[in-house]
Image: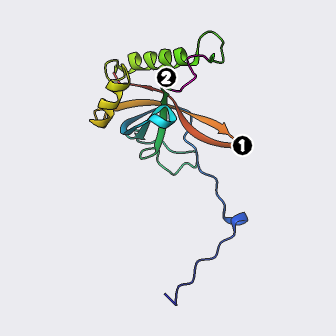
Amino acid sequence: MADFKPQDFDIQKDYVSDPLIPNGWYKGSVTNVKLNVDKHNLAWEITLNGNEGMYFSDGKTPVDGAKLFFRNWLPTKPGDENEMSPSGKQTKRQSKINMLSKFANKIGLVEELRNMESIATTVQEKKFLGMEIVAKVVENEYNGEISNQIDSLVRPN
């Protein structure tokens, strides 16, 4: 250990921003799903695969192997039944139920996402793992940082 000399660096000269995935639709699969009861969401980890010849914005990092996340917001947050959604058309609870219903119908998982009991059981039994998916990847800006996020998920035909 006495011979260990850390490699020097200069954060101003050596900093390289993370490359981004170009906006578009990418093939992938579900590699993890976590029910976050305390955060009132269902978090999907999608690993991109089967996108040969597609690269990050640096032109050299393959898109395949990248992991991105998608969240369904669950209608379980106390107070959402009384607070209106930003549109003012319905409560936040109703809005979350409607969004989850549309997602479940679009992706063909109506019974698995029917209610909290079926969601918890399906996640616990790892039924979503390995499911093929097509993800719409977009750039997102948050606190001045640009990153990728999944905007939509669909099942391949």
Looking at this view, is 154 or 143 the one in front? 143
Q: Which residue is mark 1?
A: 144
Residue 79 located within the stretch drawn in magenta? yes
Amino acid at dot 2: Pro
The image quarter containing residue 155 is: top left
Residue 122: percent from left, percent from top: 30, 30
For residue 116, which numbered disc appears in the image?
none
Residue at horizontal 57%, vertical 21%?
Answer: 80
Q: Which quarter of the image is occupied by the C terminus? A: top left
Give the number of marks: 2
Q: Is 84 positioned to the left or the right of 29 in the image?
A: right
Q: Is residue 18 above or below residue 155?
A: below
Of helix, strand and loop, which one carries label 1? loop
The image quarter containing residue 36 is: top left
**Whole-number angstrom distance, CA of label 1 to CA of label 2:** 30 Å
Q: Is 110 positioned to the left or the right of 56 in the image?
A: left
First-in-chain label (1 vs 2): 2
Residue 52: percent from left, percent from top: 40, 41
Residue 76 located within the stretch drawn in magenta? no
Q: Are marks 1 and 2 in contact (CB under 8 Å)?
A: no
Residue 117: percent from left, percent from top: 33, 25
For residue 75, which numbered disc appears in the image?
2
Q: Which residues are magenta?
A: 77-82
| Residue ranking furthest to the bottom | 2
